Image (tube, rainbow, N blue to C red):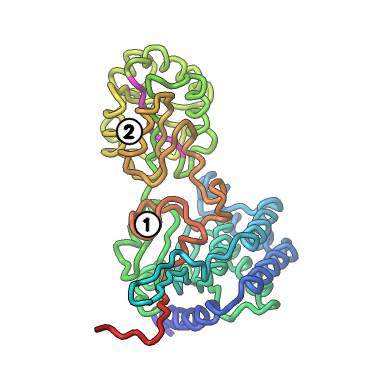
Amino acid sequence: MDLHQELAEMGARAVAAARQLALLAPRRKNTILQAMADELDARRARLMQANNEDMQAGKDAGLSSAMLDRLCLTDSRIADMAKSLRDVAGLKDPIGARISRWLRPNGLEIVKIRVPIGVIGIIYEARPNVTSDAAALCFKASNAVILRGGKEAIRSNTAIVEAIQAGGEKKGLPPDSIQLVRTTERQAVTELVRLEDYIDLIIPRGGETLIRAVVENARVPVIKHYKGVCHTYVDESADHEMALRIIENAKCQRPGVCNAMETLLVHEAIAAEFLPKVAQRLQPLGVELRGDPAARQIVPAMKEATEADWYAEYLALILAVRVVPSVQAAIEHVNTYGSQHSDAIVAAAEPAQKAFTQEVNSATVYINASTRFTDGGEFGMGAEIGISTDKLHARGPMGLEELTTYKYVIYGKGQIRE
């Protein structure tokens, strides 16, 4: 069997499973999720063994320390995976929920309700916990899922899928509801995203190179974000200590993630006083500052920022710094150089807050808070399937509701159109 045929058959089985999933009652789905979590707990030794093999192969292949950290499964991380499954079981089931209802003059009752999307393909790199999170969220929303993780985690992902399949089947999980593409051939991604007869939606998670490759080859709709060039703008009305805490958290708490701040914008009225405080706060933490001429005149130790720095997603302890003359200039910078992911204003003045939130063209916009909160768990959605910077269907952190679509159900009493 060639690769295309193999994946097409997986797709056909997923379509059949999705029809069964659409009929599962919320209580049954929650029981299945609890059983999946129990099986993950029961198979910890097997998961650790599989992950140790992946870790050794990754070290032999020269994976970076950051990649190895994402790949590693510890006892606590496995416990977190099981907890996440149980947390998803505790979330409100979106399927069948009434979105709106209205009556027409002719007596027709029109009801708009949430329904599953159908079959979802998830393409991701490195992090084995994505396997269980994605499976749980898709299943809770009554979608069948086909998972394609990175080759560096193939043994871990296989062990996780086998565990959740085994646990779920004990309580009635329909066969083929959760499938894993087990070949590590790159061509598998191309074939998967072209299965328009079987897959309804593709969600890629990973670096920009992976996501662009998916989009370029896809015949199936894709929800994605390419990168996170996130900004914090400190207005002239800002509380300085608050701003410093937010800046430190947004840049340093976890610099290698998509919601970390990459560019700091500071109003010129406070720059001379505030930027030395920024340098004093961040440089001992190992942050390299790259400034525009105005910023470097205030803090000469900054390196010179180039045009490329304003577009850069560093995913490291590097911060671009620019002095701006107004909130409007900050908005213009964000909309020009940003990635429509997560951007923040630190300000006490309500007019500045209002202008920034209304005019910044991003999926999530913060007032006096760190961009690091852009996360499904932090938003109260439970586990997260990903973050979207698209404008159609889903934007920002994607939870259960974003894994549904809707249909109209129309109740009549014999009406016909005249």
Q: Which residue is found at the position 42% from the left and 26% from the top? A: 347
Compared to residue 39, the image places residue 129 above or below, namely above
Q: Which residue is found at the position 63% from the left and 67% from the top? A: 159
**Quadrant hosting residue 391:** bottom left
The kind of residue tagged 2 is Ala
Question: Is label 1 in a helix, a strand or a loop?
Answer: helix
Across and down, in percent, residue 228 comes to 40, 44
Compared to residue 359, the image places residue 212 above or below, namely below
| Total count of labels | 2
Bin the neighbour count of mark 2 within 10 Å (Cα to Cα): few under 14, some 14-19, many 20 and up. few
Q: Is residue 92 left or right of residue 225?
A: right
Bin the neighbour count of mark 1 within 10 Å (Cα to Cα): few under 14, some 14-19, many 20 and up. many
Report the disc number at residue 211.
1
Pick the quarter of the image with the N terminus: bottom left
Rounded to the nearest angstrom, the CA distance separating label 2 from label 1 is 32 Å
**Would residue 213 be counted in the magenta stretch?**
no
Q: Which residue is found at the position 36% from the left and 37% from the top? A: 357
Q: Which residues are magenta?
A: 260-267
Residue 385 seen in this snapshot: yes
Q: Which residue is mark 2?
A: 355
Q: Is residue 103 left or right of residue 178?
A: left
The residue nearer to you, when weighing 101 against 35, is 101
Across and down, in percent, residue 259 comes to 46, 42
**Would residue 262 be counted in the magenta stretch?**
yes
**Could you tell me what secondary structure mostly forms the magenta stretch?**
strand
Across and down, in percent, residue 96 comes to 52, 71
The residue nearer to you, when weighing 287 against 260, is 260
Q: Is residue 203 left or right of residue 142?
A: left
Q: Is residue 298 left or right of residue 254?
A: left
The mark closer to the camera, 2 or 1, is: 2
The residue nearer to you, when weighing 365 against 48, is 365
